[in-house]
Amino acid sequence: MNKKINTLLFIIGGTVFNIVLTALCFVLLFLIFLWFLYPQLPQGSIAWMIPVNFIASVAASWFIYRWALKTIAKKVEISKYINSVFTRYW
């Protein structure tokens, strides 16, 4: 495989990993909310907790994704296998 295919596979794999990670964070945070906080909060709290939970899960998945990418970059020289996505053509 050449660098262009590797780059495409890296982007697709990273996107799928990030979407799955966001979904897992959302479910985990929602279960934590239901288990610990929901019995003490007013009845309408689920209406505002879902957007807050979504934003928190996106932020958590972003931090976890960055940490995983930095860990992989320390172990493997990524530039050997993939092209730079942002290059200058002039």
Image (tube, rainbow, N blue to C red):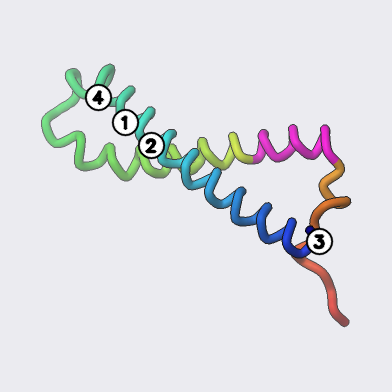
Please give the range of residues in magenta. 66-76
Measure how far apart labels 2 and 1 are at the Cα level: 6 Å
Label 1–label 4 contact, CB within 8 A: yes
Q: Where is residue 20 in the image (x, y as percent from the top left)?
A: 47, 42
Badge 3 is on which residue? 2
Q: Name the residue under label 2.
A: 26
- Answer above or below: position of 4 versus 34: below
User: Dot 4 corresponds to which residue?
Assistant: 34
Reply above or below: 80 against 66: below
Earlier sequence position, callout 3 versus callout 2: 3
Q: Residue at x 27, y 37 (%)?
A: 49
Q: What residue type is labelled 3?
A: Asn
Quick check: 69 left or right of 47?
right
Q: Give the Cα distance between marks 4 and 2.
A: 12 Å
Residue under pointer 1: 30
Instruction: Give the Cα distance between marks 1 and 4.
Output: 6 Å
Magenta span: predominant SS is: helix
Label 4 sits on what residue type?
Leu
> How many C-alpha atoms fall within 10 Å of the one at disc 1: few (<14), some, or many (≥20)?
many
Q: Nearer the viewer, residue 13 or 54?
A: 13
Q: Is mark 2 on a helix, strand or loop?
A: helix
**Structural crowding at the residue carrying mark 3, measured as other residues with C-alpha within 10 Å and reported as few (<14), some (14–19) or many (≥20):** few
Nearer the observer, disc 3 or disc 4?
3
Any magenta on residue 40? no
